Amino acid sequence: MTRIPHTLQLTPFHPRTAPLIRGHTWRRWSGHAAASVYDWTHEHEYAAIRNAAALLDVSPLHKYRISGRDATRLLDRVVTRNVAKAAIGQVLYTGWCDAAGKLIDDGTISRLGEQEYRLTSAEPNLRWLHRNAFGLQVAIEEVSQALGALALQGPLSRAVLNAVAERPVDGLKYFRVMDNRIAGTDIQVSRTGYTGDLGYELWIPAAAALPVWDALVARGADYGLTPAGIWALDVARIEAGLVMLDVDYQSAHRAMIEAQMSTPFELALDWTVSFDKGPYNGRRALQAERERGPAWRFVGIEVNWDSFEALHTTVDLAPAVPAVAWRASVPVYRAGSQVGYASSGCWSPLLKKYLALAHLSAPHFDPDTPVELEVTVEHQRLRAAAVVRKLPFYDPPRKRA
Amino acid sequence: MTNRYDAIVIGGGHNGLVTAAYLARAGRKVIVLERRELLGGAAVSEQVFPGFTFSVFSYVVSLLRPEIIRDLELARYGLQILPLESTVTPLPDGDYLASWNDPDLTRREISRHSPLDAEAMIEFGRLMHHIARSVKPFLSLMPPDPTSLSLRDLRGMLKLGGHLESLGSERFHALYKLLTMSSADYLDEWFECEPLKATKSASGIIGSFLGPRSPGSAYVLLHHYMGEIDGAFRAWGFCKGGNGTVSNAIAAAARSWGAVLRTDAAVTQVLVRNGRATGVALETGEEFTAPVVVSGLDARRTYLELVAEKELPDELLEQVRRFRFRGSSGKVNLALSELPDFSCMPGIGPQHRGAFSISPSVDYLERAYDDAKYGGFSRRPYMDIVFPSMIDPGMAPPGAHVASIFVQYAPSAIDGGWTPARREAFGDTVIDTLAEYAPNLKSAILHRQVLTPADIQEKIGISEGNIFHGELSLQQLFFLRPAAHWAGYRTPIPGYYHCSSSTHPGGGVMGAAGRLAARAILEDA
């Protein structure tokens, strides 16, 4: 008999990740238990992303297998990128919109065959896919539970994979996917990730999740492979300027009012919006917005150190930088008026800068525009000088090389 | 003369108490006259069996207007609303469908039955939230008369029109559908999972002589979405101490402003002199005088029993005679030596802190209605079961429990009338049905109280035992509640007012009618 679940859902890697988590720092991710950090602090885990190799359990992503005669047509009806143009073995990052061009979710599409795809998303999208599949011959299968996912990220991730996987990954280009085998299990490896670094994501049948994890951890030890949690990932993805659902924007399906919704242009995802394909959800609205220009823009904010330090010096304190990324709405000002808000921010140990991701209204979002970010020093709301930057903040050549 | 007041409220139900509290707060010298030995009307807690406290009639709270809680400082006077965390629908095949207080858990659970419905729930919830917000202003609005050209009515209609305009097309059309469709049809547009549709559609039949496939039931569904607790719509809670605490808190607030609350004082007649209400007479012959008399009784009693027909216009009398009550709900309260152990979810656990709903399919509910339609009680009834002692341990002795079972259908106009034997047969049917899902139930029963619409009418005076003081059907709502031209809490008799759930916005332990009536009275002063 079905019992009432008494915990969050557990990922296929939970038997391995649970013993590693020292401070019981679990958090919720799509109804799953996910590690915020395994170690006492995330410093080492973050460093592994930028310095060696980090292993992240990203199984809570929603995953759909879409196949059948009209699989391409369905995806091209739904998402903003041109799916038909993708080569087999190619992976596309894309968003998808409602009819008003407001973003519902974002994720990746892996073209696994002529008419076979895997779509990943942050939130459940089965109903939306079904509703859009009206009249099409296509099978939409949720494989979220059946498929575990690991992100192997960092400059040594390629070396780790080459040591563990049966087939070398040297030839695997950025945003491409290949079949491979680890510990006798058929898996897929895509050169994708959420860190803006060299990295891979591994798509592993849930039943064989543990041997794959064990093999990676065993051989990876020689390369400084470190299991990493969301805190480390958060810093890396802010440096990479990658937008996050429910943090930097709200799904058009969840937002309570229109003002809470965003378009791909507002989120600086222009490059994912295709106008060289047939009709798709939101196309007309997006076309109009492209001509009009977006009212908002997702940009980087770099806090001026001298200003930030001065605000602390006044109260006889050294500047306290946010080592753990914050996820909150923080006002951004220009010339005394609020011109937008930051939605996440952190200290970048790599760039030695206080960074934030922000939404600024026109015409305040051009790079190098001087703005002010609200900071709280000793319970006082103050404003530190800052400047608008183009994203990403960090973009190492090895990411694509 | 000591029996002289500024206002007399007939009936100490929660609406009467709310009116009295607001009038007293405004400085009026108020007396409430309650026929029974305790205040509260249908919101009472009683020890029917020693050591066990039953919320005898109404048993949960949600619709109680937050502005009343604030204005009357009900938290200060003992109102404590505890969360009802879940709803579990046991299914005939031994499985169940549950919704929990956590969205992730609920999505996971509904996904077992239908992944599409699990996602639809989120958007459905958002739309219903918008609708509930959209109709919220109506709950605090004195219904304007759309056929009147008075400044007050015109202003009201203008406000209304402006509000409807502001909804936008999606919400306006959803509202229109909710006003006109059946709850089953409305839910069919969203969901595919049968027990999910049935359990949701059950909200559309409560207190009504309607099946889930009857047009109009979608409105009743909406009515149950209008509640809010701590700002969350569609939140239902359990009042510590039972629903009598709601009445007692309002009573305490009223007393704090000097209101006199008398029990064992059955008003038989409203005194009318020269066409004006001047006071009331009790069964005992005792009289009270006041320039304002407010009836907290249902429309039938307010217009047809408390005053002489000659005082009222024929067309109003005719409308009130046609006002539909048709009580359809019964109640079974149990004192239990142990909790029912449901086979679908064995053991005692968090499920017992929420509701169990016997609503496996829309067909099941519709068949239950069919029985009632042709003059019987449902042989397989719909039930909403809660265990108040699991939420407030003070409701029963340690280790023992109370169960509150709301049942449909028990038609007030049952073939042959409600006799003690028929009442007990009805009680047996309820217990037999429930025992199929929880086999230990029968041996756990220490005491059983069965209430039919006839009992509700007899004990607390509501005509035909209708829990809403008259059905919440479209032709009995808003400017037609309880009658055209007389939806504004005033009556044709100057000085005589009406504050019961027979007036807008209807029943459900809202208190809104009582508050609006007080406002009308103070406006007239």
Image (cartoon, rainbow, N blue to C red):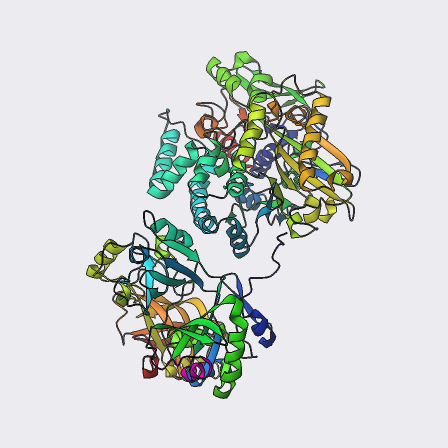
On whether residue A66 falls in the magenta region, the answer is no
Q: Quadrant of residue B189?
A: top left
Q: Nearer the viewer, residue B66 or A138?
A: A138
List x then y, in percent, for residue B385.
64, 40
List x then y, in percent, for residue B504.
49, 31
Q: Nearer the viewer, residue A354 or B140?
A: A354
Q: Is residue B325 visible?
A: yes
**In the rendered structure, which segment of residues is drawn in magenta?**
A156-172
List x then y, in percent, for residue A130.
38, 51
Residue at the extreme front of the image, as rendered: A184
The N terminus of chain B, quarter of image: top right
- The residue under the point 71% across, 38% down is B54
Q: Nearer the viewer, residue A61 or B43?
A: A61
Number of numbered discs on residues: 0
- Relative to B405, is A218 above or below? below
- Relative to B284, is A350 above or below? below
Q: Is residue B6 visible?
A: no
